[in-house]
Image: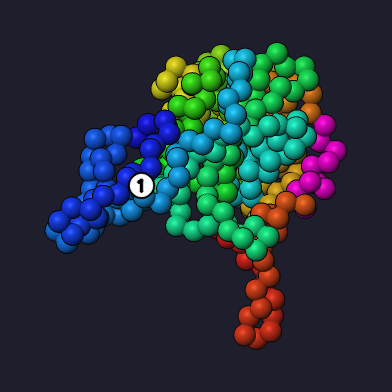
Amino acid sequence: MSVAMLRTPKLSQASGNTLISPSPTGTGFMRSNPLLPAKLKCEALIQLTMPARLNYLKHPRLKRPILIAGLPGIAHIGKLAVEYLTHKLRAKKFAELYSEHFPEWVVRDNGSVKTLKVDLYHCKPDGLKRDLLLATADAQAASPSGQYRLTGEILDVAAQHGADTVVTMAAYVLSPQESKAKVVGAASDVETVKLLREHGVQLLDSGMIVGMNGLLPGLAAARGMRGFCLLGATRGGLLDVRATESVLQALSGVLEFELDLEELHEHAMTLPRFKPPRLRLPSGIEEETSYIR
């Protein structure tokens, strides 16, 4: 499905049934027809309830932007890294990307709820002649096919703005006996592999990068873009600020822009999404939990 904004389906009445007018793809659905397969009914309801897939708040003119994405994962390294970049570089939000491929829940925000979405920002840090296009969300897509679809839609937005490089940040989980450099990485082409090595990033020689933080640079290569992933070595947990700091140091070094990290630890503690609620169990013991698992 295209990332282009979808029109809200119009409702009409015919023979006692509520009809959903054909979508931009040319497929129509009959909502109340008992003979209609449940899957198609579900897709019809999604089109009724989902807002425009790509909601532009403004239309910035970007100069050969580099897409930098960080989505929730182990220790929230990529997520926190992009959140800090948006804060410290005073990035401006310009678009929101909605998708039915997100998990079936909403995020609480000061007593209210908000729909899951990809938030897109832009900025131009000191020392860099190109713009940065930053992407993050409160969750990754819930299924393998959904991860491929949503990854493609994010890359569509990046390509429309002229991006030719895609960077992601995530976690490298250490085993109890394992010791690694603070940051390891992988790239889509020989030149970028050489660039990472020149900046002291230890290269992965085996294994998998799971989820959209791996798919984004991987599928970017299939589109003729350069892609690489920086992974912070961690023992896991809900939030690893030190590993995030190491990844951001590597990122600013590879891309050669200035980034002050003094506020990272303080900023991490002020983000509500990283503060799990405390649940009181029947025994009276309080236990922390997180809505991202």
- Residue 113 horizontal/vertical position (percent): 58, 58
SS class of the residue under badge 1? Answer: helix
In this view of the protein, which residue sits in the foreground, 180 or 156?
A: 156
Most prominent secondary structure in the magenta stretch?
helix
In this view of the protein, which residue sits in the foreground, 39 or 10?
A: 10
Rendered image quadrant of residue 260: top right
Compared to residue 284, the image places residue 290 above or below, namely: above
Few, some or many C-alpha atoms within 10 Å of disc 1 (few <14, some 14-19, many ≥20)? some
- Residue 49 horizontal/vertical position (percent): 40, 51
Residue 133 appears in the figure = yes
In this view of the protein, which residue sits in the foreground, 128 or 57?
A: 57
Colour scheme of the picture: rainbow
Q: Quadrant of the C terminus?
A: bottom right
Q: Quadrant of the N terminus?
A: top left
At 41% from the left and 22% from the top, the residue drawn is: 222
- Residue 220 horizontal/vertical position (percent): 47, 25
In the image, the segment drawn in magenta is: 260-269
Compared to residue 284, the image places residue 34 above or below, namely: above
Q: Is residue 78 magenta?
A: no
Q: Amino acid at mark 1?
A: Gln
At 71% from the left and 22% from the top, the residue drawn is: 124
In this view of the protein, which residue sits in the foreground, 182 or 132?
A: 132
Residue 195 appears in the figure = no
What is the count of numbered marks? Answer: 1
Question: Left or right of 102: which side holds 262?
Answer: right
User: Which residue is the site of mark 1?
Assistant: 47
Rendered image quadrant of residue 33: bottom left
- Residue 20 horizontal/vertical position (percent): 27, 48
At 58% from the left and 34% from the top, the residue drawn is: 57
Question: Left or right of 216: which side holds 124?
Answer: right
Question: Left or right of 62: which side holds 84?
Answer: right
